[in-house]
Amino acid sequence: MQPPASDEIEHLRVLIANERKDRLALVAAVVVGLGHEVIAREIDVEDVGPVTARERPDVALVGLGDSSAHALDLIDRIVREASCPVIVLLHARDPEFVKQASRRGVFAHINDPRQPNYAVGYKLNLPPEYLLIHRVWGGTFHRIANLILRRHAVSIGFESNYSILDSEDARDFINVCIDDAAIDTKKKRFPKAEIVQSIISYANNTDQPVDEVIITKYPYFEMLTEQIKRVDHIYQSRKQERNVMDYDDLLLQVKRLLIEKPDIAAVDPEKSASATTSGGHSGCARTVTPG
């Protein structure tokens, strides 16, 4: 059986990812045979995010290899960076994996190892109007903000291939900033990086200045307010210098983008509204402009 035919089949730029090289080769041959272009073949979790951000594929195919955890990590990194459909390829039925993958934002899954050419073709050989589905964004506020920033980060001084710091990376970065601020942490009993990180993050997510957060939430550090503010200033500046953002920045910087560049907000007011309207933790409102 051949894949569905169409006179208007879209020829796609496809990223494929799998920890097993043999399955990467198999899927690549199928994709090329269907008339599409394989723009990247990725195995390592650490590499797949930057490649996705740089290449901006039309579709990403992630295969389940020997480790479901590895495949889910691949999905996480791709979904975080991509605005395209992410499709999972299975070599056997695995409802639990499909459930976990769907929670991470996959678009669809293929479970037909007997006819890989037909199965992949059925998902990829779609008329152009169906492929417009990838323009409908769904996910967390952080994911939507990331999608917007990948397109417009240059407008606020970042490169589009910026890296995203997880909590541990951000904490290590703050440690470096404490050193850069020349603070004698032992002499002054300066708070650990994780506490400074919590102060900065709380200020970001409640629209309060850092000094007010210290007074109300961390009064025992009030005598160190100026030093903590200096670390915060260095942290914001260094992130832009090194083209990195933490999770809070995804919300702060998209807010800054939409305020400073109203022409971008006007392009798609529905997406802009969905990315900036929320409550609780996601209602991030403190505007940070690194100096």
Image (cartoon, rainbow, N blue to C red):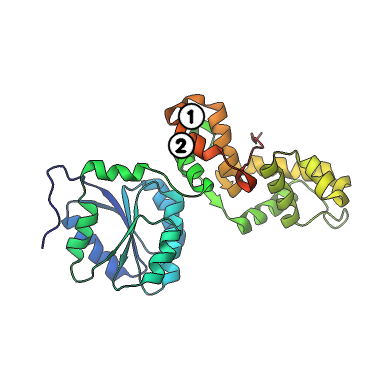
- Tell me the crowding category of disc 2: few under 14, some 14 to 19, or many 20 or more residues within 10 angstroms, Cα based: some
- Measured from the top left, where is residue 18 in percent x and y? 35, 65
Q: Is residue 175 left or right of residue 5?
A: right
Q: Quadrant of residue 203?
A: top right
N-terminal of the pair, mark 1 or mark 2, is: 1
Q: Is residue 242 visible?
A: no
Image quadrant occupied by the N terminus: bottom left
- Measured from the top left, where is residue 67 in percent x and y? 41, 73
Q: Looking at numbered disc 2 in the image, what kind of residue is underneath it?
A: Lys
Q: Looking at numbered disc 1 in the image, what kind of residue is underneath it?
A: Ala
Foreground pick, 286 / 139: 139
| Vertical arrangement, residue 9 with respect to residue 69, above or below | above
| Vertical arrangement, residue 288 with respect to residue 164, above or below | above
Q: Residue furthest top?
A: 263
Q: How far apart are the two marked residues, 1 and 2, measured between alpha carbons?
A: 8 Å
Q: Is residue 209 visible?
A: yes
The residue sitting at 88% across, 55% down in the picture is 187
Q: Which mark is residue 265?
A: 1
Q: Is residue 192 left or right of residue 115?
A: right
Q: Is residue 86 left or right of residue 45?
A: left
Q: Residue furthest front?
A: 279
Q: Quadrant of residue 268?
A: top left
The residue sitting at 62% across, 42% down in the picture is 283
Image quadrant occupied by the C terminus: top right
